[in-house]
Image: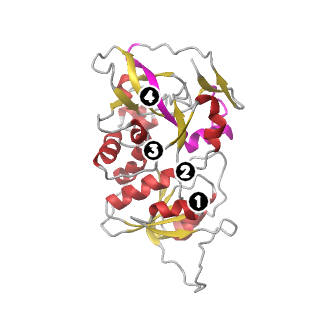
Amino acid sequence: MKAIYYNGSYPEYRENHPVPERKSGESLLKVRLAAVCTTDKEVLKGYRPDFNGVMGHEFTAVVVESDNSELVGKRVVGEINEVCHECLYCRTGREHHCINRRTPGLSRDGCFAEYMVLRDENLHAIPDELPDEMAIYTEPLAAAYEIVEQIEFETGTPACVIGDGRLALCVAQVLHQYGAEVTVIGKHPEKLRIFESFAKTEQLDSTTMKIEDPAGTGAEIEPYELVVEATGSASGLELALQLVRSMGTIVLKSTYAGGADVNLSLIPVREITVIGSRCGPFDKALDGLTGGAINLPEIDLYDLADFEKAFQSRKFKSGFRI
């Protein structure tokens, strides 16, 4: 089969990669769409130096083989954490942090291929009325809904999302859906325009990392009760600390290779709550996409052989039609 294989140093396009064999409790999936995530790009920078295998973890697919006959023929998306159900974290309701978990495209073969294998328990049927081109957003949108699983806030709470990419777009819409007064801060005017129907926007000067002040008033921005960092870069945390209120909350969404040079003493001195946030509820994401609460741009699609173009695409979301 065709696949994009990461050899530990760089990705390779292969046309003769073996079709994976499923085990009991797993399904063989024919991949329809696969999407490039920021995490995939971080793999190329050394985020998972021990990984060798087929890349990718965001997909839509059709089940072609399964012990569960009800799954066969279904269009599905899949949660990315395959867990053991036995370790400390599984026994205490924290399965996403399973010590023995495997993740497609990070610790086992993923979805940048014609076929992949995933456990039956990880699969969610796509509603008939939801096209693949929207269902492909389920995994990143679920990560956005995780924020409202982790924290509560009142209607009208001043919230800031740092970043203007795909994850930020998902997060900002979810916060708006739950009643927050959302401001989005990003570097790209053309991307920020997409947020304007449901959020205020502010442009960040990429040189100074300060919010631009076209009017030259010198007015300071009032800090936010909730700040979600979704930049995908180390500089995001430093900016979040500048923007959050004392005793406010920062939610960190970025995963990137490397460290962050920040003054951590600000966190205890200002009594700031910092929450790491990763995977989330697929059922809420599918409901949001199907019910129209969430609107996302079209994905920019390529053939697997053109993977370099997909990785370099400047569109909100790129990926593969397989």
34 left or right of 293 in image:
right
Q: Which residue is mark 1?
A: 236
Q: CA distance from mark 3 to mark 1?
A: 19 Å
Is there CB contact under 8 Å for labels 2 and 3?
A: no
Q: Which comes before the other along the chain, label 2 or label 3?
A: 3
Q: Which comes before the other along the chain, label 2 or label 4?
A: 4
Q: Which comes before the other along the chain, label 2 or label 1?
A: 1
Task: Please state the horizontal and vertical placement of residue 214, each as a whole percent of the image.
Answer: 59, 79
Is there CB contact under 8 Å for labels 2 and 1?
A: yes
Q: Which residue is mark 2?
A: 254
Q: CA distance from mark 2 to mark 1?
A: 8 Å
Q: Which residue is mark 4?
A: 82
56 left or right of 93 in image:
right
Q: Residue at the spot x=39%, y=24% of the render?
A: 62
The answer to which image quadrant residue 74 occupies is top left
**Magenta run includes residue 51:** yes
Which is nearer the eye, 169 or 267?
Answer: 169
**Crowd tier of the residue under label 1, counting other residues whose Cα lies within 10 Å: few below 14, some 14–19, many 20 or above:** many
Q: Secondary structure at mark 4?
A: loop
Q: Which comes before the other along the chain, label 4 or label 1?
A: 4
Q: Which residues are magenta?
A: 24-53
Q: How many marks?
A: 4
Q: Give the amino acid at mark 1.
A: Gly
Q: Which circle, 3 or 1, is nearer the viewer?
A: 3
Q: Residue at the spot x=54%, y=81% of the render?
A: 220
Task: Please state the horizontal and vertical placement of residue 184, each as a whole percent of the image.
Answer: 48, 65
Q: Which mark is residue 140?
A: 3
Q: Secondary structure at mark 2?
A: loop
Q: Give the amino acid at mark 2.
A: Ser
Q: Give the amino acid at mark 3.
A: Pro
Q: CA distance from mark 2 to mark 3?
A: 12 Å
Task: Please state the horizontal and vertical placement of residue 179, each as a whole percent of the image.
Answer: 31, 64
